[in-house]
Amino acid sequence: MEEYYIGGLFLGVGNGVTDGSGPIIALFIYAGLCGTDIFKREVLGGYVVGHLMGYALIGTQVISVFMK
């Protein structure tokens, strides 16, 4: 979509598409092999892992919007 609107796809040295794919794929493979209970665990004083992942996703998207 970016190529259509601005005429090219310009990625920085590190971009979330490739840099974030490795850990996410590893997490999903682990969840597939060991079960999805990892997303229900409480860590860091009562936060649920699934919620933390959602907060991280929203936070990185907000940061990327303001960095442009």
Image (cartoon, rainbow, N blue to C red):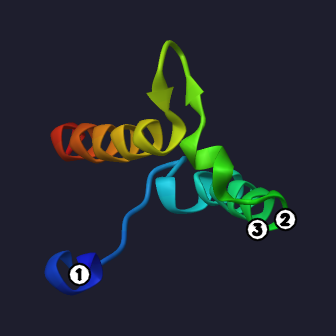
Mark 2 sits on what residue? 33
Tag 3–tag 2 contact (CB < 8 Å)? yes
* Residue closest to the eye, 19 or 50: 50
Residue type indicated by callout 2: Leu
Which percent across, then down, holds residue 49?
A: 53, 38
**Placement of 30 over or under 47, stated as above or below:** below
Residue 43 relative to residue 1: left or right: right
Give the numbered dot on residue 52. none
| Crowding at mark 3 (Cα within 10 Å: few <14, some 14-19, many 20+) | few
Mark 3 sits on what residue? 32
Residue 52 relative to residue 22: left or right: left
Res 9 → quadrant: bottom left
Q: Which residue lies furthest to the bottom in this view?
A: 4
Mark 1 sits on what residue? 7
Residue type indicated by callout 1: Gly
Residue type indicated by callout 3: Gly
Residue 10 relative to residue 44: left or right: left
**Placement of 26 over or under 65, stated as above or below:** below
